[in-house]
Image (cartoon, rainbow, N blue to C red):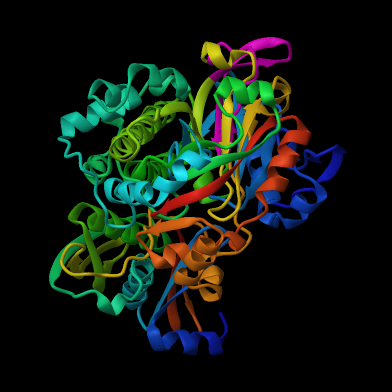
Amino acid sequence: MGQEGMEKLRGAGWETFDHVADIGVRGIGLTVEEAFENGAKALFSIMVEDLSEVIPRETVPVSCSSYDLTGLFVAWLNELIGVADIREMVFREFTVQINNVSLKGTAKGQRWDQGNISRGIEVKGATFTKAIVEKSNGFYVAQCVVDV
Amino acid sequence: MNAGQPRKIEDCIYEIPRTGAMRVPAYIFADSHLLRDMDSKVVEQLSNVASLPGIVKAAMAMPDAHWGYGFPIGGVAAFDPGEGGVISVGGVGYDISCGVRSMALGIDRKEILPYLDQLIQELFSEIPAGVGSTGKLRLSMEELDDVLRGGAVWAVERGYGEPEDLQFIEEQGRLEGADPARVSYRAKERQLKQVGTLGSGNHYLEIQYVEEIFDHEAAQAFGLEKEAVVISIHCGSRALGHQIGTDYIQILGKAAAKYKIPIRERELVCAPINSPEGKDYYMAMACGVNCALANRQVLMHLVRKSLKRVLSHTDCRLIYDVSHNTCKKERHRVNGKQKTLYVHRKGATRAFGPGHSELPDVYRKVGQPLFIGGTMGTCSFVLAGTRSGEDLAWSSACHGAGRSMSRRQALKRWKGKSVINSLKSKGIIIKTASMRGAAEEAPEAYKDVKRVVDVTHRAGLARKVALVRPMAVIKG
């Protein structure tokens, strides 16, 4: 991604990108943790019409590990999808702490039945397709394609 | 890897010759138009599949193939366990046993039209659909293990359907070899409230009518005639299947390294079929298949309940239930000898031809029914398996239209409301849990299913039986 695209993306911190049948999610940040947090926002933006409608009422701890940073980003998203499924929740705000290839974080959001959230589409899981965690033009980028 | 360019060897068959690490050639079933529209990743992914140990004859792509996860979607490959053959997560996909179940209602279009609004509303209330929805069943972990072992047989035993339904489901409703102990607690935990849910994305329930019949003998065997009403459900193993895929990407990733199998793409990870890891994955994947079969059986039960309330005199006979994302142990002829092969079909439909012993008596003369989903605004097809499909592609055929436009582009181009209104003007009712989903599933975002089916027919993979049109659709 060029400098111009990076600056544009920097505003929101996240975006989705094209994939032939599914959707890509991308987070950007000054730190790898921030990129992971923003990548999670891109993920949940698919599940609702408007992420700002989600009220961060409840905080859920999330942890995962992998064998490299790219694997950790995919594992982080999959952990969030699993936790959201089990708790019947949707998340909006995230914190991440990374130690080598282990992650401890939080996800804040609400249950689907707490209010009338306009639903998007279900994400079944994060994949390794186009999965990258890298530093580019001074920013960390974390991305992958998610299966919908 | 640099794969060779496909070259035409027969009408609707292109070959990628064996080069580099490829152990066998690859075949793409397509015409020039479909081939041109396939992304280059299909060729690359097929060549990667052709390089895996123990692959037999060829790696193949069906006419609706596109870029997938490790395997192309529409990818078919068979592996011989006796020759070091492997089992791969990418060859099955994440939504294990996603498939289509179609039911004949025994009434025609004119009879249902006065009740169509009421029926689709009733079905929309009865069938949980969309992100965040949960089913009405509340299962314990022990009961869920029974689902994973028993599939549709479990559902029928619990009163969700009739015993005679089972003969019209692949594997008679239950894939042997499932072991719930090979499935993670997380996968089961996610599934506890999801049995009997439709899901989201390209999953749907459609009320359709038969507009055209191409093969009268097969149509008659399937109980289809012009104007007959059919209900089709497209969905899979829900959260459980995906979690199994996610878990075994890690497990088979380590196994591939252990057995020194070179992997060119992370989701192509695999293990020898006869290794402990390979056996574990098969047993877990079989649980995913059974979960999907149980799910569609419960959904059919909900359809029958709704029908009773709205159109009590109708029948709801299962025509057949097909799965798209599977690895199955099957007997096939290789160099004149019968062998047990592990046939991976990722986004491809099993298509047994006439005479196959697996088929119910009433279909044995004409071959297995296949249901090829188009879009909510165009049409879908009923096909039948052929004898030639056995030699061509291990009795496999296409599974759908395939997208021509990404979801993101579709979302930029259309609004859900306008898609629904446009279809309403054509007489098609859409009920959806998500306006975003409706926009992403706009009919124009898909390829022409007619071309995919025509090529499937011309290539001899399966033959056209009937064309069905949507009248009312539920999208998750």
Looking at the image, which residue is at 68% across and 9% down?
B337
Left or right position of B299 against B111: left
Quadrant assignment for the C terminus of chain B: bottom left
Q: Position of residue B70 (x, y in %)?
A: 55, 47
Q: Is residue B349 magenta?
A: yes
Looking at the image, which residue is at 46% across and 51% down?
B472
Looking at the image, which residue is at 64% across and 44% down?
B48
Residue B3, visible in the rendered structure: yes
Q: Position of residue B153 (x, y in %)?
A: 32, 21
Left or right position of A111 against B370: left
Looking at the image, which residue is at 30% across and 34% down?
B308
Q: Is residue B311 magenta?
A: no
Stretch in magenta = B330-359
Residue B206, visible in the rendered structure: no
Q: Position of residue B53 (x, y in %)?
A: 61, 31
Left or right position of A26 against B339: left
Q: Which one is nearer the viewer's eye here, A29 or B118?
A: B118
Q: Which one is nearer the viewer's eye here, B249 or A137?
A: B249
Q: Position of residue B361 (x, y in %)?
A: 53, 11
Left or right position of B435 against B360: left
